[in-house]
Amino acid sequence: MGKIWRISGPVVIAEEMRGSQVYEVVDVGDDRLTGEIIGLEQDKAVIQVYEDTTGLRVGEPVVGTGEILMVELGPGIVGNIYDGVQRSLVTMMGDIGDFLLRGARTDALDREKKWHFTPSVKAGDEVNEGDIIGSVPETGLIEHRIMVPIGIQGKVLEISEGDFTVEDTIAMLEYDGQKKPLTMMQRWPARKPRIYKERFPPEDLLVTGTRVMDYLFPLALGGKAAIPGGFGTGKTVNLQQMARWSQTHLNIYVGCGERGNEMADVLYSFKKLRDPATDRLLQEKEIFIANTSNMPVVAREISIYTGITMAEYFRDMGYDVLLVADSTSRWAEAMREIGARLEETPGEEGFPTYLGSRLASFYERSGRVQCVGKPERMGSATVIGSVSPPGADFSEPVTQATLRIVDALYSLDVALANKRHFPTINWLQSYSLYSESVDKWWNKISPDYTDVRNRTLIILQNEAELEEIVRLVGPEALPEDDKLLLLVARMIREDFLMQSAYHPVDTYSSPERSHMMLSTIIKFYDLAKELSESGMLVSEISALKHVQRISRMKDVPHEEFEKYVKDLRADMEKMTIEQEGGM
């Protein structure tokens, strides 16, 4: 046991700490605040404290626990709300009220609740690490698959079906003449990636329900992406939309240093929204980590690792998991503050020199893998982080370090936000390296996906090139074919790329719906070209009723959409035939 020697904000230096180890969890002060050793020098330990250090005094005791920071994994995680160090805020609210107290402790998993365990192996079977030995119906959407912990194997001596708590023994193994009890709970180091058999390149689309992402800049299951943007561009709304509607088995939302009202809005909405695929409450497939801006700054770092460890755990069950982190800039600011208090040599703009490696250690834990154990199964963990560059300056260190790691970028544009164009994803600055990988997936929806996508990007690029000419001479000076291109580009922007997160229908667009919308606009472009070549002016084409009908596509209810589009296309074909006949 040591004692406090110096206090500098969230950093505490303790003396008489010989025998301690780096990353060991310690109890700091009389209130037993949770801390973690991040540096050792002779008999002094540098500790980052995950709670407010106001009121600590020199000389108060520091007690080592002998353990590193672990994440508890087992039934009861899904639908729960945690802080950065995995204290259950739901349990704490029931035990101590609406306000957190310093030094308050709570278990991440309920030790008293019983879960019905159904075994999938029997006595006498040989099991190895990662093998699934049974299951628990955790929610209506998640079957919690109980796995043999990593590093444990042996022969099943006994296993039984029944109702158990997470600490009860559900099976007994024998290995090297020793008996090993198994429970439904595992513990795993937060900073250590979980193991897997083999890693595969991402190839299936992560369906987010946001058209500009799914169609123009697709993200694959197991991929990694970043959403940078300035203030007011809608980073949080975009991430909330992905956490709400992404068609994965499980979604994890990490509020890292964001405003408390935004986190409250997320928690409130998920109690009411339903999954479009199953019509069950979205809360049944979500995990929330709330580490808001008024919480201790150093807990932001560990909240990111807590989230990704949970994602890997469910990935190992064979699930597709999405983790969204809002935002990694707040995490980097926490590292900068800690680095300054430790008097480390600063890098660019004061950020620590290891900023890039820390970001990489987080993003690279994504992936699509073959899981350890039997039965053989594939799982994926997809990671999306928002970045909040000051003044929307994408040249700042956090954004640049992130861009060197991720394979998809959704660049949010302040100019689009000022025009009330949401989502504000700039189609000229964004990119996805997964486009070719998910072509096979999209071609199952429609064989002409690649052609429609490429033509759309060309139209938007040509529109950007014409904008300078339009500013100089006005649109009336352009030839008719350029006027038509500008008309269709506007239709793509306003009728396809714009999408309201708060509209009951437009908030989620399935891949089939998105393709029918955009292919209809491209079909209109082809037919309009024929009309233009036959002598019709673009001003007359823009006045056609079909333009207004296309603009209403996004508001058509899902059950009526297919018929609406078929009728619209038939009318467009008929209109073209009649026009040619009249000529």
Image (spheres, grey):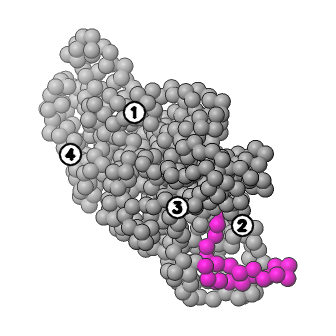
Under mark 3, the amino acid is Gly
Mark-to-mark CA distance, 3 and 4: 56 Å
Distance Cα–Cα, label 4 vs label 2: 54 Å
Q: Nearer the viewer, residue 336 or 33?
A: 33
- In this rendering, the answer to whether 293 lies above or below 273 is above
Q: Which residue is drawn at 65% across and 33% down?
A: 344
The amino acid beneath tag 4 is: Arg
Whole-percent x, y for residue 152 in the image: 75, 72
Label 1 – label 3 distance at C-alpha: 36 Å
Q: What are the residue bounds of the magenta stretch?
A: 167-193
Q: In which quarter of the image is the N terminus?
A: bottom right
Is residue 197 shown left or right of residue 120? Answer: right
Dot 1 lies on which element?
loop
Tag 2: amino acid? Ile
Q: Is tag 3's residue or tag 4's residue first in the polypeptide sequence?
A: 3
Between discs 2 and 1, the one toward the N terminus: 2
Per the image, the residue denoted by label 4 is 552
Could you say whether the residue bearing mark 4 is in a helix, strand or loop? loop
Q: Nearer the viewer, mark 4 or mark 1?
A: 1
Residue tagged 3: 103
- Of marks 3 and 2, which one's residue comes earlier in the chain? 3
What residue would you read off at disc 2?
150
Question: Any magenta on residue 175?
Answer: yes
Q: Position of residue 576 (x, y in %)?
A: 21, 37
Whether residues under marks 3 and 4 lie with C-beta atoms below 8 angstroms apart, the answer is no
Which residue is under mark 1?
Answer: 230
Q: Residue at x 55, y 27 (%)?
A: 349
Residue 507, image x, y percentages: 30, 51
